[in-house]
Image (cartoon, grey):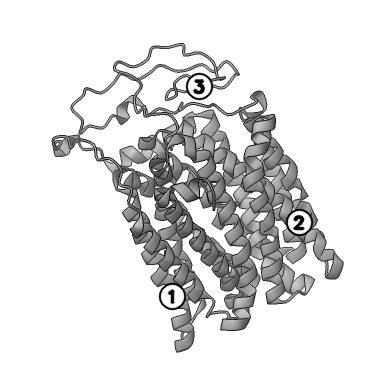
Amino acid sequence: MTGLLRRDRDFRLLWTGEVAGQFGSCVTGVAMPLIALTVLHADALTVSLITAAAWLPWLLVGLPAGAWVDRLPHRPVMAVAQAVALLTVASVPAAAWAGVLSIGQLLGVALVRGTAQVFFQTAYTAYLPVLLPSQDRAEGNAKLQGSASAAQLVGLSSGGALAQLLGVTGGMLVNAGTFMVSLLCLGSIRHRPAAPAAPAPAPAKERRPLRRDIAEGLRLVAGDPWIRSFTLFGAASNLALTGFQSIQVVFLIQHVGVSATAVGLLIAASGLGGVLGAFAGPRIGARIGTARAMLVLELGLPALVLLIPLTTAGAGLGLYLAGSLCVSLGIVGGNVLKAGFQQRYCPTGLLGRVTATASVLNFGAIPLGAVLAGALAGWVGLVPAMWIMTAGVPLAALLLLASPLPRHRDFPTDACLAAPADSADPTTTDSAPEAPEAVEAADGDRPRPWARHCPGTGPVTGRQPRGGTSGETPNGTSPTARPTRFP
């Protein structure tokens, strides 16, 4: 244990809780499909619906969750979300032992746990920049992403073994235990954000309605070419990624003919790519430029995912490993680079709304991908469905060619995203600043009404607002992402 983990107790606790949570979640990621397949005898469509249900809450509550998180202390939100997830997951083995487990309950567990995950992920994304100073965030992102990928590797490989040892439902107890570890770690963090001076209460008519915060998040994401491009790419990529991931257990067991234990080991081995990507991503970015590295990691390596549908028994399992290792390496490496960029680019006061708005599209595509893959498996067959969904991964990455990435060597290095002038907090005593005029990007991007000057994107052609830039905070104050997903 070196560097940041050794010298920062609070980060060490956050890291421990996150690693434990990732391990348990990956055990459940193997256990839930196995429960549906082997205990409740579900078909491919039903298994994909369970995957979809876990991500559906991003479409249902993602937007208001971002606005709420920006108004609430982050750590208590994370703790409540983990407590809800703990109780929900523990209900599965309890129902199985009572003989009342059903597909309906699995769907309900996935929905409730997914809703808790919406609030946890949004608060967690906004909390890390508060916990760490700007000079430590690159190291913090790499350690969280790399360790989470390692925990995924161990969790996925343990999922099949735990199913053999404890039964497929008994493995869910492991996930419940990891949520307890996460809760204890969160409760032990000593860091408390400095509380600003309390302003005088605003009249009720001046208090910001929730829908105004939601609309602001939508405008910010739609109006900035960097955030907009990453959001659209993330949604398309997650549609394809989750599509093939939601049917890969069925594919490996029914088509390739491997055992439940071997499924866990194969999926876990692919997680080695994520571990490598977490540490290789920043190094590649330092050598060739972060924007160029993003293209290599997200467009080049994941194209080898097309080896997965060619998988056969025996030596043919190497095709699955090669394809899944490369896609995992590329995605996690790209996630680390993008996380560091967004933490610099998005001021803390806007981070919850920006993250949640982008996540509604990014994670909202996940249930659609899962349902689409399950439907295709029933309509055209399991193997053709796997071909279609894996082909979508490199096709989605082509969207990055229409982003600012090809025109730059590196991401912008300063905080460049600013709130619209009408987002000024009405509870403050200062008068609202005047809205900045549009910024015309020299590289051909359309004007961005809410951005101020970013390095490499052209000069400011309009006035700066009176009293400084609206929503401006110190540089580098803002999300990390779960491995293999695009927040």
Q: Mark 1, residues whose alpha carbon is within 10 Å: few (<14), some, or many (≥20)?
A: some
**Residue that numbered label 2 is attached to:** 387
Q: Nearer the viewer, mark 1 or mark 2?
A: 1
Q: What percent of the width, then of the height, locates residue 466?
A: 30, 15
Earlier in the chain: of badge 3 and badge 1, it is: 1
Residue at the location (58% across, 76% down)?
36
Check the image and report above or below for 340 versus 378: above
Task: Check disc 1 and report its element: helix, strand or loop.
Answer: helix
Task: Name the residue at the right extreme.
Answer: 315
Task: Check disc 2 and report its element: helix, strand or loop.
Answer: helix
Res. 31 image quadrant = bottom right
Check the image and report above or below for 482 versus 420: below
Mark 2 vs mark 3, CA separation in Å? 41 Å
**Residue that numbered label 3 is attached to:** 454
Which amino acid does the dot numbered 1 rest on? Answer: Ala
**Residue that numbered label 1 is attached to:** 90
Confirm or deny contact between disc 3 and disc 1 (CB under 8 A): no
Which amino acid does the dot numbered 2 rest on? Answer: Trp
Which amino acid does the dot numbered 3 rest on? Answer: Cys
Q: Mark 2, residues whose alpha carbon is within 10 Å: few (<14), some, or many (≥20)?
A: some
Along the line of sight, which residue is nearer the eye, 473 or 304? 473
Res. 411 image quadrant = top right
Q: Is residue 427 visible?
A: yes
Mark 1 vs mark 2, CA separation in Å? 36 Å
